[in-house]
């Protein structure tokens, strides 16, 4: 890069500027990481330690944050008394079920949409993307009434269907972009060599497999983190982790220790999954518009 | 499929009896068999999607024209356009829209300026990898958990951010979420914390596609780094920022988990954005007919945004299509 080769002379203004930049980065770093650190440490503190604060304006007292005896009591309580193991299973079944259904049907549809030209294709695509963008509450109003009359409220299949309302259009839309990037020539070559269409499709599967895998993970993430659908459609029989966390708020007292522990339990697996699909994350979160 | 079998000649009538005929017609995807094959691939997804989105949409329209009765045995009462006309005199409805736009405008302006700033600083620096990894962490968090975490930080007796604001002498009396303007700032800060990283990642992806020749040419012409950013890098970033703005705006009214947890719309409706109001009407007061009418207006906005978004995706002159998609 040419810009690197330009000789820069040190001047007071330039030094001040770089100090400002570094300061800004440090503040941004702390701002991003501090809440996570507080959540993690608070989940291992007993309530007396968690509520300890230095006096107002006592900047030296910040060390109080890390002055505690670690205890796993909140986690033990979550999984024994509060049945979080069961809720975790519900979360996993609902999000994974919806992800697998969405990506399976979605990749078939995406392949067809990528290869076929027909009248009304644009309208179909528009319908698909606007389904995905509809506000969750607005979708839920009619869905609740329908699910109520068909007995799906409070069941895991109901929740899987509800998550599919946003996961399926997402999968179709984003996988279509994926198939668009695979040249048709590969399939054509396979067809010329005597493969049938199904075998030709299997030829290009290795090319799209990493993406398909990543988008299954992303669909799991969307389902796992959902609260609105789970709180209304899943209320009763299919309680998921976010809903169970919200229920730790009781009229008498908010059980902060347990809530922080539940937060860690809900968040940590998703962070690992996020790291795993790092390469596809921005593509997924921008509906395929931006690629790194 | 049926069409093909009708047109195929029965083998007995063929002049070449006993010889298997091989069809050498080129396998182009728009010929009939391929069309059917692709249609069968497409159909299951489309049918399922229709069942869970189009059918409910028809229901939504039905509900918006009725007074919905949830008690078993009672049938819905015809209400005509009452549910819609009532919205015009509904002050909370109008306020909901205003608050929604205010909330989104605040979130977006802070997120975009911070995100672009961070991305420009980090681009090509040694810290880029480290920060990208850190960026992932807030984004992966369930909005509910983020809501609780910030509620904990804002708490008036043991919240660290409360302590920080008090120590800085900015916050006078009361708690953060109990004060009208501070509560808005509080929920905006939560959104900013969670989603500025996404803007930064999008901007970083955009910065990688700024043509180096243009930057160099500009520099040879004597432009400094600041001038270079505003006259070369920023115009190249616009499509990326446009996508970022649209997506974030959409998510601002798609997800209301954080607001429901932190304030529930309060204090004094200061943070009651329209979807939150819709949630209250539908699932607290169970006035589903009125809720359906409100939901309908929200969906209209969604469709409008969807139109803009598909235009950007389709327009071949846009950078996003040629550079954004490899």
Image (spheres, coloured by chain):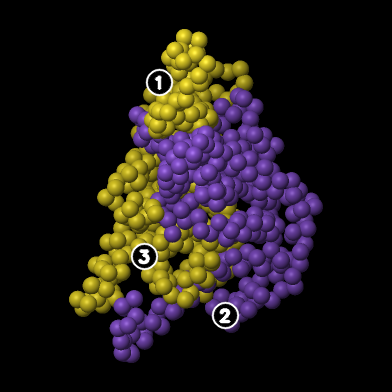
Q: Secondary structure at mark 3?
A: helix
Residue under label 2: A58
Which element type, helix, strand or loop, lies under badge 1? Answer: loop
User: Residue A217, position in %: x, y?
Assistant: 58, 50
- Which residue sits at x=36%, y=65%? B207
Q: Residue furthest left?
A: B221
Which lettered chain is shown in purple? A
Name the residue carrying label 1. B80
Sequence order check, earlier mark of 3 and 1? 1
> What is the distance, in whole Å, between disc 2 and disc 1 at their CAs?
63 Å
Q: Position of residue A249 (x, y in %)?
A: 66, 51
Q: Nearer the viewer, mark 2 or mark 3?
A: 3
Asked whether the residues under marks 3 and 1 belong to the same chain, the reply is yes
- Rendering coords of residue B79 (x, y %): 43, 21
Q: Which chain is yellow in the rendering?
A: B
Q: Which residue is mark 3?
A: B207
């Amino acid at each position: 890069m040419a810009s690197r080769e330009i000789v820069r002379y040190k001047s007071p203004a330039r030094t001040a500027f770089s100090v400002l930049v570094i300061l800004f980065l440090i503040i941004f770093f702390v701002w991003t990481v501090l809440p996570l650190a507080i959540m993690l440490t608070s989940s291992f503190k007993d309530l007396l330690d968690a509520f300890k604060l230095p006096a107002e304006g006592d900047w030296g007292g910040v060390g109080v944050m890390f002055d505690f005896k670690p205890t796993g009591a909140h986690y033990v309580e979550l999984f024994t008394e509060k049945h979080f193991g069961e809720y975790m299973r519900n979360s996993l079944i609902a999000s994974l079920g919806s992800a697998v259904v969405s990506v399976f049907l979605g990749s078939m549809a995406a392949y067809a949409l990528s290869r076929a030209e027909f009248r009304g294709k644009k309208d179909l695509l528009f319908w698909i993307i606007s389904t995905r963008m509809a506000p969750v509450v607005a979708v839920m109003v009619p869905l609740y009434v329908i699910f109520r009359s068909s007995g799906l409220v409070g069941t895991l299949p109901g929740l899987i269907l509800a998550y599919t309302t946003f996961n399926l259009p997402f999968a179709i839309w984003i996988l279509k972009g994926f198939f668009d990037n695979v040249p048709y020539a590969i399939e054509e070559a396979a067809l010329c060599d005597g493969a049938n269409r199904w075998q030709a499709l299997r030829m290009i599967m290795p090319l799209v497999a990493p993406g398909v895998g990543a988008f299954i993970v992303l669909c799991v993430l969307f389902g796992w983190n959902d609260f609105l659908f789970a709180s209304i459609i899943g209320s009763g029989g299919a309680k998921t982790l976010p809903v169970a966390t919200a229920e730790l708020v009781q009229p008498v007292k908010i059980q902060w220790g347990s809530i922080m522990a539940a937060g860690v339990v809900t968040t940590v697996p998703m962070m690992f999954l996020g790291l795993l699909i790092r390469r596809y994350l921005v593509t997924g979160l921008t509906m395929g518009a931006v690629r790194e | 499929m049926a069409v093909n079998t009708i047109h195929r000649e029965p083998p007995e009538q063929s002049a070449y009896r006993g010889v298997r005929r091989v069809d050498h017609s080129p396998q182009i995807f728009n010929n009939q068999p391929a069309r059917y094959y692709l249609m069968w691939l497409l159909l299951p997804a489309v049918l399922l999607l229709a069942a869970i989105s189009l059918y409910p949409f028809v229901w939504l329209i039905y509900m918006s024209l009725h007074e919905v009765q949830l008690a078993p045995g009672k049938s819905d009462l015809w209400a005509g356009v009452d549910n819609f006309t009532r919205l015009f005199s509904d002050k909370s409805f109008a306020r909901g829209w205003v608050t929604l736009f205010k909330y989104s405008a605040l979130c977006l302006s802070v997120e975009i300026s911070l995100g672009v700033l961070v991305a420009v600083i980090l681009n090509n620096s040694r810290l880029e990898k480290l920060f990208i990894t850190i960026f992932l962490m807030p984004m992966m968090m369930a909005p509910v958990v983020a809501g609780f975490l910030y509620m904990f930080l804002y708490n008036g007796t043991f919240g660290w951010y409360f302590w920080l604001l008090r120590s800085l002498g900015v916050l006078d009396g009361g708690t953060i979420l109990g004060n009208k303007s501070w509560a808005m700032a509080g929920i905006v800060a939560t959104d900013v914390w969670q989603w500025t990283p996404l803007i930064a990642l999008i901007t970083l992806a955009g910065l990688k596609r700024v043509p180096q020749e243009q930057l160099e040419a500009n520099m040879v012409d004597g432009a400094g780094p600041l001038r270079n950013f505003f006259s070369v890098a920023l115009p190249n970033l616009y499509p990326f920022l446009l996508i970022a703005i649209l997506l974030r705006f959409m998510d601002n009214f798609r997800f209301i988990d954080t607001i429901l947890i932190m304030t529930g719309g309060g204090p004094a409706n200061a943070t009651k954005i329209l979807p939150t109001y819709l949630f209250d009407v539908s699932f607290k007061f169970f006035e589903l007919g009125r809720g359906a009418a409100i939901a309908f207006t929200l969906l209209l906005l969604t469709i409008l945004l969807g139109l803009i978004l598909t235009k950007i995706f389709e327009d071949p002159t846009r950078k996003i299509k040629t550079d954004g998609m490899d």
